[in-house]
Amino acid sequence: MTERHADPVDALAELILRLPDVFQLVAGPGTGAPELSWGDRFFFVGDDRMRPFATVVVRNVPGFDERSDLDRPGRFRLNVELGRVRFRDLFGYGPEEFPAHRAGIDFAAAGRWFPHPVYAVQGWGSIVNPGPEAEPLIAHAHARSVKRSR
């Protein structure tokens, strides 16, 4: 991220919202989202807003996704839809091979990309507390979403 903000989640959201035609949904009261996801952010391209290209998760979801240790102060995780090819380029194996690699992945390591703890098999990647290294993959996920929405 290019600017310094008091809240790194806000700074990341601002970066994503600078991309063309991006809509952000922040889960909370009145959105229909479960309370466990309140504060999470979902980024969409297009009017259907059914399939995000990126999400920002701010806490663990007990029994579903606790591997990134997001309940510690100051931790959050960016998730982006990479697609099969970029996933393979980044991790050295395809999304379909994720289950065989899961045990060797540190999902709590900050500042480095890893397959999404739950949605890797759909071609998603994640990074805890991202920095500027996230920008190219955010742009990639956005471009995929723009292409899909046309």
Image (cartoon, rainbow, N blue to C red):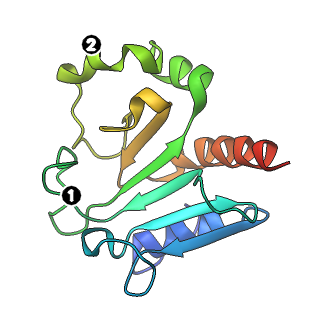
Relative to residue 122, is residue 38 depicted above or below? Answer: below
As drawn, is 27 to the left or to the right of 12?
Answer: left
Quadrant containing the N terminus is bottom right
**Which of disc 1 and disc 2 is earlier in sequence?**
1
The mark found on residue 61 in the picture is 1
Separation of marks 2 and 1 at Cα, in angstroms: 23 Å
- Total label count? 2
Residue 24 position in % (x across, y down): 59, 71
Q: Quadrant of residue 16?
A: bottom right
As drawn, is 9 to the left or to the right of 63?
Answer: right
Relative to residue 120, is residue 23 depicted above or below? Answer: below
Q: Which residue is mark 2?
A: 100
Residue in the foreground of this view, choosing between 16 and 44: 44
Relative to residue 120, is residue 97 depicted above or below? Answer: above
State the residue at coordinates (40%, 31%): 120
Residue in the foreground of this view, choosing between 28 and 79: 28
* Amino acid carrying mark 2 in the image: Ala
Residue 70 position in % (x across, y down): 21, 58
Q: Secondary structure at mark 2?
A: helix
State the residue at coordinates (42%, 76%): 32
State the residue at coordinates (41%, 70%): 8
